[in-house]
Image: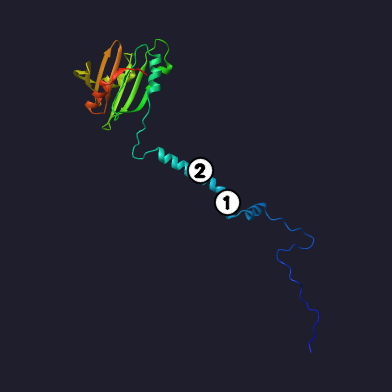
């Protein structure tokens, strides 16, 4: 008969238990932080950022028409600067139809001292999608004028709204309308159709603010 007595089996010790006389290493802090995170916490953290991004995208989409890449500007401040420094009444196209959209404006008046020449340039997108450039200056050798009329071929005089203009063909093959009065040179040119360039020339008048 077999009796029940002590056995040689030893109590099982967990694998990760520390050996006698040693201390168990603390769990890495990164692991502790990861254990505290949850999907809900992450979602709450990201939600404000996602909402801000969606608002920005929506605002950009509303304020940018992908079908119209033209950036229209208001040239008033540039014209006013030119007028404040020029020694002559600044002439600009006024009362143009809705299809004429100003896309650029620049002047050298910002660096002009009293008595210096002042040049003003304005660029327009015309109803047909062409470009009409306008220049007015009291500098006979203005670079903006030379860029158009140097090398151009004159084709005679034309009357536009009661004013005599010189019609030329530039080296680029574009029409240029120009006139000089009281030391002030005005030029209209560009890739736009001749009737559109004429419309810009006919609209030239002293700036009234």
**Mark 1 sits on what residue?**
42
Q: Earlier in the sequence, mark 1 or mark 2?
A: 1
Q: Which quadrant of the structure image shows residue 16?
A: bottom right
Q: Nearer the viewer, mark 1 or mark 2?
A: 2
Quarter the N terminus occupies: bottom right
In this view, 135 is above or below 40: above
Q: Which mark is residue 52?
A: 2
In this view, 148 is above or below 68: above
Return the x and y of residue 50 as percentages of the image width and height: 51, 46
Tell me the residue at 23%/28% (across/down). 193
Name the secondary structure under disc 1: helix
**Label 1 – label 2 distance at C-alpha:** 16 Å
Name the secondary structure under disc 2: helix
Q: Is residue 52 left or right of residue 5?
A: left
Return the x and y of residue 51 as percentages of the image width and height: 50, 45
Return the x and y of residue 160 as percentages of the image width and height: 22, 19
The answer to whether residue 170 of the structure is visible from this angle is: no
Q: Is residue 151 left or right of residue 53?
A: left
């Amino acid at each position: 008969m077999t009796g029940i007595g002590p056995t040689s089996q030893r109590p099982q010790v967990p694998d990760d238990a520390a050996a006698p006389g040693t201390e168990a290493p603390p769990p890495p802090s990164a692991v502790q932080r990861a254990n505290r995170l949850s999907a809900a916490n992450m979602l709450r953290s990201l939600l404000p950022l996602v909402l801000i991004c969606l608002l920005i995208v929506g605002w950009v989409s509303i304020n940018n028409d992908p079908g119209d890449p033209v950036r229209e500007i208001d040239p008033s401040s540039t014209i006013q600067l030119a007028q404040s420094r020029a020694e002559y009444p600044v002439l600009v196209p006024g009362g143009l139809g809705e299809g004429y959209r100003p896309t650029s404006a620049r002047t050298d008046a910002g660096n002009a001292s009293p008595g210096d020449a002042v040049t003003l340039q304005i660029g327009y997108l015309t109803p047909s999608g062409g470009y009409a450039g306008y220049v007015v200056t009291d500098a006979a050798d203005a670079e903006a004028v030379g860029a158009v009329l140097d090398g151009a071929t004159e084709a005679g005089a034309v009357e536009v709204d009661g004013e005599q203009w010189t019609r030329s063909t530039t080296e680029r093959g574009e029409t240029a309308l120009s006139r000089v009065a009281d030391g002030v040179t005005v030029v209209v040119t560009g890739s736009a159709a001749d009737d559109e360039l004429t419309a810009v020339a006919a609209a030239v008048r002293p700036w009234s603010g």
